[in-house]
Image: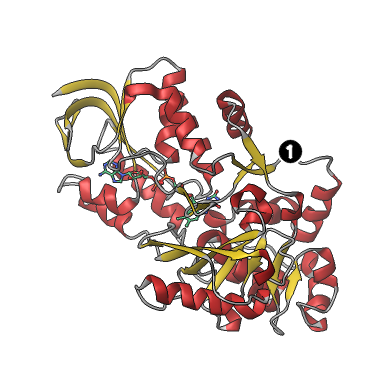
Amino acid sequence: METVPYLIVGAGITGLSLAYALQSAGKEFRLLEAGPGVGGNIQTETEAGFTYDLGPNTLLVRDPRVAALLEELALPEQLANPLARRRFVVNRRHELVALGPKTLLGGKLLSARARLRLLTEPFRPRATGDESIAAFVRRRLGPEVLDWMVDPFVSGVYAGDPERLSLAASLPRLAQMEKEHGSLLGAALRGRRRKGSKSRLLSFAGGMQSLPRGITARLGDKILCNSPVTAIHPTGMTWQVESATGDWETERLILCLPTQEIARLLPPQAEALRRQLAAIEYPELATVALGFGREQVQHPLDGFGVLIPRQLGIATLGALFSSTLFPDRAPTDHVLLTAFIGGAQGKLPSAKTEDIVARVVEDLRSLLDIRGEPRFQRVRWWPRAIPQYQLGHLARVEAIDAALQSWPGLSLLGNWRGGVALGDCIGNGLEFGRSL
Ligand SMILES: Cc1cc2nc3c(=O)[nH]c(=O)nc-3n(C[C@H](O)[C@H](O)[C@H](O)COP(=O)(O)OP(=O)(O)OC[C@H]3O[C@@H](n4cnc5c(N)ncnc54)[C@H](O)[C@@H]3O)c2cc1C
């Protein structure tokens, strides 16, 4: 059995960021990863001249801690095409409408009644307590904004159901805007007046996978891949950890894992903790990368992508215009689309790859005016994709932290707390590492 002061389990972006902070502070640690490579959800592949991300496609950098990490890593960044500011949503007539102030005021997405109602937003009362995203949007902005704008947005970020997601946990910035300004429109106007937001949307040369690889290059032999942890045992002062490549003893064990995996590893006496963790839902989702000849797609693909409101009864949640975002992702005269299907409100047509591709292509065909069949296709099935921060989530995380008091030396991290976006996971991992 080897001994190490800090033992991290899980080399997704959370565990890697935490390890990076420990490394920077000169602390001795090891990081055990079950798979053959690092990055967890971050998965880039290259085939037939297409470079596609089957997990996260973009990183929004607005947290100074994340910006500082990227500066230190000095990886070749690729800023998203400025066209990415234009995001399309499908309206009742199955047309693609670019979201923005003009859409709110024009008649292409919202009825006259819904637009008039928007004007009353500053006078709506403030909420108290935990509220679903759907209830919040209905209350402040009206049901049409929920159905045609916010619901597709929630599909795009969480593959989630706004009726069940907690506003405070899932969209804390929106909850904060209401709390501070009493009005979303007022807060948005004030935000626009503030000079130059520092956020930027990016990926890396070679795709998103270059980020975990870049961090790994700084960590050297402290990461042990192909080392799934199979059991953890508290001894009182320390934790003993069994992994496929050997056993470890540590004073500080930090699991950076999905909740069901943590629940599986916890000792039998940790029943209350296990129940809280196991209650966090992760719906299934499939990512579908599709390559077409440029001439096969009549739509100019001049934006970030398209989101499809659930009201339309279309199975596909939406698609990124990946080769518009990052032009080197498709061979010359070709385009790459990355679509998503499934999620908390949807269902996959079947478990078969060909059925999933056929469904997505048919859904996108008329929206983007696609002729013929894709020249390239790849499906990645995520049986448990993204944790859902449902009503009561913040209280649940507090209960988890309280229950952890009975297990000294054990810490739990991951995208199921503090934000699912890559930027949140990086910030949380770095911050936790610096606190040790
Ligand atoms: C399809 C999809 C699209 C997304 N798109 C975006 C996007 O565009 N932008 C964005 O910001 N975010 C996006 N996200 C969210 C973001 O990718 C995730 O929240 C984030 O990558 C999670 O990182 P993590 O380290 O917390 O967990 P994970 O990535 O799940 O990492 C956990 C790691 O633990 C390892 N592991 C599991 N069990 C064990 C064990 N017993 N022993 C050792 N190791 C173990 C796993 O192999 C894995 O490497 C997307 C997520 C998905 C699924």
Residue 351, position as x, y percentages in the image: 34, 73
- At label 1, the amino acid type is Lys
Instruction: Name the quarter where the C terminus is drawn.
Output: top left
Residue pictured at 76% horizontal, 54% vertical: 83
- Residue 81, above or below 436: below
Residue pictured at 47% horizontal, 55% vertical: 54
Tell me the residue that label 1 is attached to.
Answer: 198
Residue 174, position as x, y percentages in the image: 65, 56
Q: Is mark 1 within 8 Å of ligand 1?
A: no
* Quarter of the figure with residue 77: top right
88 or 249, nearer to the observer:
88
Residue 92, position as x, y percentages in the image: 70, 83
428 or 244, nearer to the observer:
244
- Residue 155, above or below 33: below
Residue pictured at 41% horizontal, 77% vertical: 355
Q: Secondary structure at mark 1?
A: loop
The answer to whether residue 205 is seen in the rendering is yes
Horizontal side of 375 relative to 117 (left or right) equals: left
